[in-house]
Amino acid sequence: MAATVCFSQSAHASQLGRRSRVVLGVICPVSRRCCLIRRTHDSDTSNCSATACVPSPASHARAHEQFGDCELGDLRRTKRLVKVAEPAAARRDGSTPDQTESWSDCKAVDRLMDGDDVTHAEIIRPHCERTQHSGEPGATKLILCDTTEIDFKRNIDGIGPVGRGTGRGFFLHTGLMRDADSGKIEGMAGQKLFHRQPKTKKKVARNSKRRDPHRESVVWGQLIDDVGSPPPGVKWIHVCDRGADDDEVSCRAFLNRCGWVIRVARLNRKIEAVDGSGLTLGEHLEQQPMQGRLKVEVPRQRNRQTRTAEVTIRFTPLRLPPPSRGNDWIKQNQPDEPLLMWVVELKEGHPPQGVEALHWVLLTSEAVTSLADAQACLRQDQLRWGVEEYHKALKTGCRVEQRYYETADRLQRVTGLLSVLAVRLLQIRSLADDDPDQLATAVVPQPWVQVLAKVRKRSADDMTIVQFVRQLAGLGGHLGRKRDGHPGWLTLWRGLEKLLLILRAASLRT
């Protein structure tokens, strides 16, 4: 990082345990000139944070692009949101006092977060609309859907239980758009924020829960309606987890002219074979011949290590009749004919000792008539892990759960802001995996590459995106040894924070 020297500070700040402003001289690695920056100190030096007084033109342009079209009831609120987004992007994991540069700015953020017209939905709307309009005719975009819980671990009026009922917070259901061919992260296509209602002790029949219009699983279909239909000539495919194994989800996707790939949760559901016979999905799969063998990479999850599984594959068409006890929406909107779709089954015959055998069943609207089609369907399902990485970026990198606002409305609004900011670094890291040989200057701003190369003593002319990510993580403390693996979100965020600090210091020379 650039060299720094302290010019002045409040006397005995560390001994008094008070926050104080410190003026730092940052030696810009490009101009070799000294730039002044204010720095906030706590009595605990591990909590120090740095912010620059003057935003860079690139950060202002990006903040205006993401939030400049928000309609918050007053143009001044929109300008304030853009101004708030600039330091928040430079220090995504910092608290509001860390991200602002004066007491008046901090108060202005608090007033902004108290505005009735400032909502989670409106803050993310311009970003989502821009994502929805991306894509040229002929392109296929995947909308990767998943839900995560945001646990603040304290009692706040207006939020509900999460986890096993002991946590307190809300849930985020995100649709992340990704190009089906290149794997490029386009951005958020939509996001729903909802609260869980406390459970009642009264027992309710399972079929009654499925008909309940307020059940949690209805959010999968609601997000599909919010995202809407694709632009002319563009295909959208919603890729969903087992939570979306609901007739209403596929029906809503069909009515919005979208495709779907859904992980099956129930094999005992009734289906119709193409010959008109009725049987369960599990029975139908048992009658199908094996179409081939594949090796599948099983990602790491919780206590499960990454491994390669050898599976057999089967696929066949079927029709999904409406449920015998559907809810009111199903009765009003169900198509006249049962939906035609295909099922793809992957089953592991001989798993390692002590490891549960892999068994995935996918329902898709896309025709699967060959092994290549089945592999394409499987790849679309595996790309769904991208939305889980996005949620990790939001919770680990942006530290959304460490926000200490005292009202539910403020927490929802700041979550909307951070949800948009979390997309950027995910885009950079995903390109490092999908297209590692691409030049970094084609992905990130050229000043980022030049300054990072100067600080890390590398050449900027031929730096690839994977080299950029590794050097950025190195700036954040990642050692880069062979056994260290891929950089985590914390080191990437720390590296980006330092890089943006140096860039903002360099902008002061002009």
Image: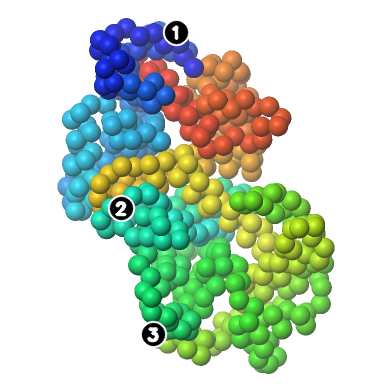
Q: Dot 1 corresponds to which residue?
A: 32
Residue at the spot 76% in from the left edge and 72% down from the top edge: 314
- If you read the primary sequence from the N terminus, does the residue marked by circle 1 or circle 2 appear first? 1
Residue at the spot 25% in from the left edge and 50% down from the top edge: 407
Residue 75 drawn at (x, y percent): 19, 44
- SS class of the residue under badge 1? loop
- If you read the primary sequence from the N terminus, does the residue marked by circle 2 or circle 3 appear first? 2
* C-alpha distance separating marks 3 and 1: 69 Å
Q: Is residue 201 visible?
A: yes
Q: Mark 3 touching mark 1, by CB under 8 A?
A: no
Q: Dot 3 corresponds to which residue?
A: 328
Give amino acid for label 3: Asp
* C-alpha distance separating marks 1 and 2: 50 Å
* C-alpha distance separating marks 2 and 3: 36 Å
Q: Mark 3 against mark 1, which lies toward the viewer? A: 3
Residue 28 drawn at (x, y percent): 43, 13
Quadrant hosting residue 264: bottom right
- SS class of the residue under badge 3? helix
Q: Dot 2 corresponds to which residue?
A: 155
Quadrant hosting residue 266: bottom right
Tell me if mark 1 has few (under 14), some (14-19) or many (20+) residues whose alpha carbon lies within 10 angstroms of its own.
Answer: few
